[in-house]
Amino acid sequence: MEVKVVSSKLVKPRYPDGAARPDTTEHVPSSVFDMITYHFQMAIIYAFSAPAPSTAGIERGLADVLASYRLFAGQVTMGPAGALGVLLNDRGARIVEACVDDATLADAAPSKPTPELLKLHPYLDDEHEEVVLVQLTRFACGSLAIGFTANHAVADGHATSDFLVAWGRAARGLAVSSPPHNHPDLFPPRDPPLVEFEHRGVEYRRPTPSANQGHHGADNVVIHKAHFTKDFIAGLRAKASEGRGRPFSRFETTLAHLWRTMARARGLGPEETSTIRVSVDGRRRLAAPPGYFGNMVLWAFPRATVGDLLNRPLKHAAQAIHDAVARVDGAYFQSLVDFASTSAVEREGLEKTAVLRDVLGPDMEVDSWLSFPFHELDFGTGGPSYFMPAYFPTEGMMFLVPSYTGDGSVNAFVPVFDHNLDAFKQCCYSME
């Protein structure tokens, strides 16, 4: 697939006629949740079948929505007090236009992430001045691929999905309201701080020589898409929840199944311990204002020996996940806020644990996008025909995404070593 870049330009916020222009010198400091999360360009690919939305309509909607979501039109910089944050200078978002003349979208777009997907969004490893970069790639058949990337230091997946839906609304001429973002009084520490939980070795760690080797992607990793039908998931939930008053959730059950499948496929020994890093949204737990735009994620770490995972019933793995997530409650989130305010991080030289690695085995990490409203991204011609995460070959880092068919099924994008792929396929659809 040959992708030809046609143009590249900035799209700046467009304010209503007669409206007062905002302060473009305001600096929004990063919250503690912005500081401790992953700092990289996250990317997702949307595809729209012909007749696809027009470039003019997409750009017009982007200009209008950036007037409300100004963090995505600013720049990540150090503020006057030396703290990282976003300068609301209305620099804008970058749109790259591209085309593919030698293939249709159906021919060129893979059903799962491969290196070919890297051609459908701006290059992620460059140092970008903009927070948001978008590539519009039009195919000979009239279809459109939208490669959307945003700096994770500014917003998490929940906030970004809200932005994408608002972008579609703006393109259709509908009203969009400005979401609340961080300010110094929003998530205050208690006085005096009360650190009720251990955060060293969880969100923070002492530096080690191998801690920051960088992320390049493992050489022999392939990303497998496992499609779990609604009926298969219902069967898993019934099996895992047998004898339990309240069934495990779709997420808990699917992740428990994948945890056991990965342990088998990797050929791990029964005495080895496997841990999953599970993102936990803190919006309700910390009573964030409705529509809060930024990062609000901490992590749960369910762990088990491989022997227990494979020799005990599915409900054992599901219960470990459920219990670990439940422990990351409002008190835990507030304890993290208090810990970060004590200056222990600076005094002890602690570093965040949220850094990218090439290989996670025997551990795993999961990003669940099951609750994100992907189907609601509509620029005026209807929702996307499909969507998927970009190519991200970190062994063991999974994405759970609702199927673009909208029938309640789940797509799990699972990076595995190619020598483990056959074993993974053999057991991922078994309920044993």
Image: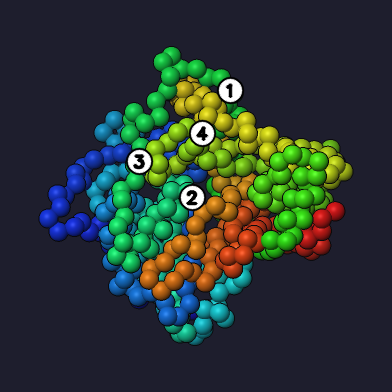
Distance in Å between CA atoms under marks 1 and 3: 27 Å
Residue 142 x, y percent position in the rendering: 44, 82
Amino acid type of the residue tagged 3 in the rendering: His
Report which residue position mark 1 lands on.
197
Which residue does the image show at 59% across and 50% down from the upper left?
368
Q: Earlier in the sequence, mark 4 or mark 2?
A: 2
> Outermost residue toward the right?
311
Residue 376 x, y percent position in the rendering: 46, 62
Distance in Å between CA atoms under marks 3 and 4: 17 Å
Apparent side of residue 422 relative to residue 148 in the rendered image (left or right): right
Task: Say if 95 sits above or below 342 in the image.
Answer: below
* Mark number displayed over residue 25: none
Q: Dot 3: within a 10 Å radius of its alpha carbon, few (fewer than 14), some, or many (20 or more) residues?
A: many
Report which residue position mark 2 lands on.
157
Distance in Å between CA atoms under marks 4 and 2: 17 Å
Distance in Å between CA atoms under marks 4 and 1: 16 Å
* CB contact under 8 Å: marks 4 and 2: no
Report which residue position mark 4 lands on.
285
> Outermost residue toward the left?
18
Circle 2: element type: helix
Q: Earlier in the sequence, mark 3 or mark 4?
A: 3
Amino acid type of the residue tagged 2 in the rendering: Gly
Which residue does the image show at 44% across and 63% down from the upper left?
377
Apparent side of residue 189 relative to residue 183 in the rendered image (left or right): right
Which one is closest to the eye, mark 4 or mark 2?
4
Amino acid type of the residue tagged 1 in the rendering: Phe
Distance in Å between CA atoms under marks 2 and 3: 15 Å
Which one is closest to the eye, mark 4 or mark 1?
4
Report the front residue among 264 and 237.
237
Residue 143 x, y percent position in the rendering: 46, 78
Distance in Å between CA atoms under marks 2 and 1: 26 Å
Which one is closest to the eye, mark 1 or mark 3?
3
